[in-house]
Image (cartoon, grey):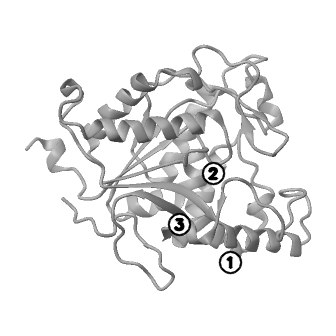
Amino acid sequence: MSQTQADRPGHRLLLVHAHPDDETIGQGATMAKYVAEGRGVTLVTCTAGELGEILVPELEHLAVDRDGGLGEHRRREIADAMGVLGVTDHRWLGGFGRWKDSGMKWHDDGHAVVADEVTPDSFWFADLVEAADELVKVVREVRPQVLVTYDEFGGYGHPDHIQAHRVAMYGAQLAAVPSYKPALGEPWEIAKIYWGAMPESRMRESLRALRESGDTTSFEGMDPDGPLPFFVQPDEAISAIVDAEEWTETKLEALRRHRTQVATDGGFFALSNNAGNRVWGAEAYRIVKGVRGDLDEHGHETDLFAGIVPD
């Protein structure tokens, strides 16, 4: 057994995300909790988010249509955020800059779609096998028992989120095939795969808390009792809720490191501590592969590794 194998944590989580900040918004508390528990956490980011909207006026010059450089800046932001969460194994799919942010535009129905102009080197146009092979290398090296990524719609339709979903699901499948490209490493089958999710009841509760606090601008036009965004899922679709409320402030501090992308002076940041902890610190998932372990009184797993014996 090599030194690397000897030091490998018994439980290992792999997350695949499209841009810097996606990982912290979706699973930052889970990541911090698992790191603190001594479990392995590996994050793969597919693009540097060069086309992201810049929320800090003094950094607007980093936009691609001005001086540029947003991707390099976000590279530093995610490094800082991972430092806060304690994640030491962060990788760029195929290496930093291999694929570019594809951009997006908004559809009249309220979800993201492919932009009118997409550059040939964008992640949206990545060859699926080529991109999946880069993930196969990571899977076969890290040998995770659990994978977390987006659903087939990428949460809200962003083309890079959708492509990250495709690469993660296909890469996981290819990595398990013994005869598939042995040069990429020894085959490894991921036992459990989850898609990040937001339960309907929690979203409605959060919106109601915002409106009752007098905030009418956050999620403007969204009624707590009306239609909800595409990333919200019915409560019965939720398989697991990882209660990491102890790590809520750690997650929020990591989000603050994504300074160009996350406004921390409104929205869910404005929620009272109790409501905010439930929104930010208890993260929900849908299982799409594997057998669920022990369930709580609500029918949820409370640990993504439930039923998996550490190796």
CA separation in Å, label 2 and label 1? 18 Å
Three-letter residue code for mark 3: Trp
In the picture, residue 302 is in which quadrant? bottom left
Secondary structure, mark 2, is: helix
Say if mark 2 contacts mark 1, CB within 8 Å. no
**CA distance separating discs 2 and 3:** 12 Å
Q: Name the residue under label 2.
A: 255
Identify the mark at residue 274; answer none if there is no mark: 1
Answer left or right for 59 relative to 4.
right
Identify the residue at image location x=62%, y=31%: 49
Q: Residue drawn 78% across and 65% down?
A: 270
In primary-sequence order, the first of circles 2 and 1 is 2
Q: Name the residue under label 3.
A: 247
User: Does label 1 or label 3 sit earlier along the sequence?
Assistant: 3
From the viewer's perspective, is 304 left or right of 25? left
Total numbered labels: 3
